[in-house]
Amino acid sequence: MPLVTSREMFKQAYGKYAIGAFNVNNMEVIQGIVEAAKEEHSPLILQVSAGARKYAKHIYLLKLVQAAVEDTGLPICLHLDHGEDYEICKTCIDGGFTSVMIDGSKHPFEENVALTKKVVEYAHAHAVTVEAELGRLAGVEDAVKVNTADATYTIPEQAAEFVQRTGCDSLAIAIGTSHGAYKFKGEPQLDFVRLEKIAHLIPGFPLVLHGASSVLSEFVDKCNQYGGKIESARGVPEDMLRKAGTLGVCKINIDTDLRLAMTSVIREYLSLSPEAFDPRQFLGPAREAIKSMVKHKMKNVLNCSNQLTYL
Ligand code: G3H
Ligand code: 13P
Ligand code: ZN
C-alpha cells in the first residue's frame, strides 16, 4: 500500500464522520498514532508543519511515514500543514507528500485565490490534493500569533466563490476554533449556522477544522502538577467536534492534545524517577500516551473507527 491522497478518504467520510489529521515531529509520535489507527481500523492523515520539517528534516519524516505504511499496511495520507508559499508546497509535492495545504488566509481574497490556484495547478499535475484556507483563526502557529481581534470568520458566499475559482480539494474554515492550548476565554462557541451555510453553498465539498484540540484538563493538570506552568483555557468540546463531523467537516486537526498527553507523561516520569536518564524510559510511555489519546479521538470524537471497509 503506497501513501494515498485525501480524495477517497473525504469522499467516504463526507457527512458521516471526520478523519483525524495529527501533527508529527518524531518517531515516537508517528508510531503512537499509527498503532492507534491500526487497532481502530481507521483512515489517517499525518501532517507535517514547516516547523516540523525544520526540526526533524523532510527526509526523516518522509521515511518514517513510509516505514509506518510498510509496517501497518494502512492507507496513510502525508500532508503539509500550513504551507505558507508556493515554494514549500512544491518542495513537498516533489518530495513525496500526497497532500499539501496552501495557507493563504493572511492575504487579501484575490491574492489568496491566485496563490491557491497556482499551487492547485502544480499539485494536480502531480496527483496531489490541496487544502486551502479562507478566514483567519486566532491563536499561535509556529512563531506567528494571531490576536482574537485579527481573526475573521469565513464568509459563506466567499467560500463558494473561492472553491469554484481555485479548484482546491478541501477548505479550512474559521468558525471559532483557534490554535494552541488557550482557546475560549468564556463558554466555547462554534458558529454552526455559518458551517451549515457554507456546507449548503458547496454541497459535498470537504471542509476542514484547524485548532480542534479539546485541551482536556486532566492532561494540563498533570503537566502542572509535575512542575509545568501551562497557561490554558477551555478547548473545543468533543461533542461539538462530533457534530461538525456530520455537517461536512471531513478533516479535524489535532496537535495540542497530543503535545499535552506526551508532556504530561514525561513530566510525571522524570519527576517520580529523578535517577532515570535512558530516554526510552520516558519516550516509551509517551508513545503509549499518544496512542491512547488518538484511539480516544478516533472512537469518541471523530467517529472514524472501523471505517476502512471501502478498501
Ligand atoms: O497549526 C500548527 C500546528 O499545531 C503545528 O505547530 O508549527 O509549532 O509545528 P508547529
Ligand atoms: P490544535 O492546536 O488545536 O491542536 O490545532 C492543530 C492544528 O490546527 C494544526 O494545523
Ligand atoms: Zn492549523
Image (tube, helix red, strand yellow):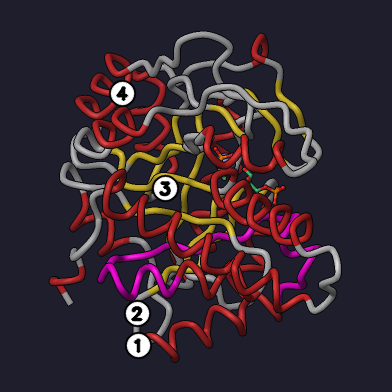
User: How much space separates mark 1 and mark 4, taking CA atoms?
Assistant: 34 Å
- Rate crowding at label 1 as few (under 14), some (14 to 19) or many (20 or more) other CA atoms within 10 Å: few
Task: Specify the segment rendered in magenta.
Answer: 34-58
Q: Mark 3 Cα within 10 Å, few/some/many (few <14, many 20+)? A: many
Query: In the drawing, what numbered circle is on residue 168?
Result: 3
At x 38%, y 85%, the residue is 72
Image-quadrant location for residue 162: top left
Mark 3 → mark 4, Cα distance in angstroms: 18 Å
- Foreground tag (3 vs 2): 2
228 vs 170, nearest the viewer: 228
Question: Which of 253 and 136 lies nearest the eye of the viewer?
Answer: 253
Mark 2 is surrounded, within 10 Å at the Cα level, by few (under 14), some (14 to 19) or many (20 or more) other residues, namely many
Per the image, label 2 sits on a secondary structure element best described as: loop
Residue 126 place in picture, x, y as percent: 48, 72
| Residue 49 covered by magenta stretch | yes
| Pointer 1 or 2: first along the chain | 1
Question: Which kind of residue does numbered mark 4 sit on?
Answer: Leu
Q: Secondary structure at mark 3?
A: loop
**Front tag of 1 and 3:** 1
**Quadrant location of the N terminus?**
bottom left
Residue occupying image coordinates x 74% and y 44%: 226
Which residue corresponds to the image point at 61% horizontal and 43% vertical from the top-left?
115
Residue 195 is tagged as 4
